[in-house]
Amino acid sequence: MPITKSGMRNKVIETLSQVAPPGEQFVACVHGMTGPSPWLDTVIGSIGATIMQAFRKYYFVTVTNTSVVVNRAGRIAANPKEIVAVVPLASGAIEKVQKGAVWGKLYVRFPGEAKATKINIGRIWNKDLDVLAGAAAPFAQVPTEVAAQQ
């Protein structure tokens, strides 16, 4: 069970390497959760936060030189699980990246969905989020200050 950020990233890349086509290069990987802002967990207290956790989905979003790969992540142990979606990077699957001081937001459009899904990204992933934003910038609505930090 990976505990550190680099351990989680390595586990995701190891898992994806088993199914990736030859020559695929991994650019960036971030871990996050869906649902309302995680700040809300603090406001509503422990019982409300526990209930909120039942409705959240956890994902690893990995950008390669050609694709955006989304893996489901475990709720307790941040292990990568099944692949949810693989979308060409050039299709604009990453619609928007907003980097925050504590919580950033990544908007990913899953195939067949009418609207992008917001994934909250914790600040420990900020450097990876910068790299991901830079890779997605030609195809997404990435704020220039995030893309310029590359």
Image (cartoon, grey):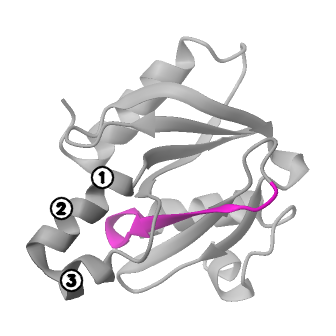
Q: Name the amino acid type tagged 1.
A: Ala
Q: Name the residue under label 2.
A: 50
Q: What stretch is highlighted in magenta?
A: 114-125
* Number of numbered labels in the structure image: 3
Quarter of the figure that contains the C terminus: bottom right
Q: Name the residue under label 3.
A: 44
Q: Is mark 2 on a helix, strand or loop?
A: helix
Q: Residue 54 carries which label?
A: 1
Residue at 78% in and 52% down: 93
Dot placed on the residue nearer the N-terminal end, 3 or 2: 3
Residue 8 x %, y %: 32, 39
What amino acid type is highlighted by mark number 3?
Ile
Residue 66 visible somewhere in the drawing? no
Determine if the magenta segment contains residue 74: no
Residue 123 highlighted magenta (yes or no): yes
**Contact? badges 3 and 2 (CB < 8 Å):** no
